[in-house]
Image (cartoon, rainbow, N blue to C red):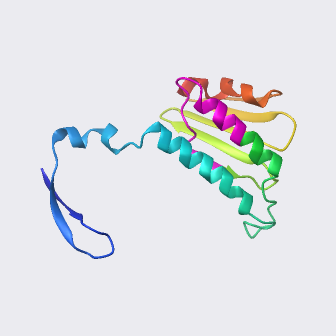
Amino acid sequence: MTVRTPLFESTGVERNVRLSSRDLRPEAFQPDQETVWDRAIAEVEGFRSLREDWDGAGALPPHRESIARVLRMLATMQDTNGAIPPSAVSPGVNGDILLVWEEQGYYVEIEVGPSGPARWMRQVGSLTEHGEARDWLNCHVAYEPIR
C-alpha cells in the first residue's frame, strides 16, 4: 500500500511512503510504555505552573504536596512489572490531581490530594466501586483489572 504523507508539515511538500501490512498493525501506532509514562510525569510536573483560577472558574492550583505524592505514585507504578500508565492526568479544582485509566470495559479514577487517603472509583462493565486507600500507594486495587 502506498500513502502520501507530509515530508515536513510546515512546507506542504508530500512524499509517497510504501507501507507493509506489518506497519498497519495496531501496535505500530501505539507509543511505547516508557514514552507514555514520561508524558504523564511531565504533565504532572507542569501542574506546578498553574495559578489560582487556572480554569477561569476559581479553581485552586494543585498543592505542591499533591504533585509530590502523584509523582511518587507514578514512579512506584512505573517500577511495578505489568503496571500501565494512566490514560490521562488532570488537575482537580480543589488542589488535588486526578489520574484516569480507560480501557475497553474498564474506567478507573484515582484522586490524590495533599494529605489523607486517596479516593478511587472503578467501573468494570456495569459495576461501579468506590474506595479510599490510607496508604495512597496501595490504590493498585483500583487499577488492577486493567493490568
Q: Is residue 45 above or below residue 54?
A: above
**Relative to 91, residue 87 above or below:** above
In the figure, residue 130 lies in which quadrant?
A: top right
The picture quadrant where one finds residue 137 is top right
Residue lying at the far bottom of the rendered structure:
11
What is the quadrant of residue 37 in the picture?
top right
In the image, the segment drawn in magenta is 71-89
Q: Residue 72: x and y, percent?
A: 71, 37
Q: Horizontal placement of 146 versus 113: left or right?
A: left
The residue drawn where x is 66% and y is 57% is 46
Which residue is depicted at the point 78% across and 35% down?
118
- Residue 37 lies left or right of residue 30; in this view the side is right
Note whether 65 is above or below 133 in the view shown. Answer: below
User: Does residue 55 sit above or below 137 in this rendering?
Assistant: below
Taking the spot 82% from the left edge, 60% from the top edge, the residue there is 60
User: Horizontally, is 40 left or right of 71 in the view?
Assistant: left
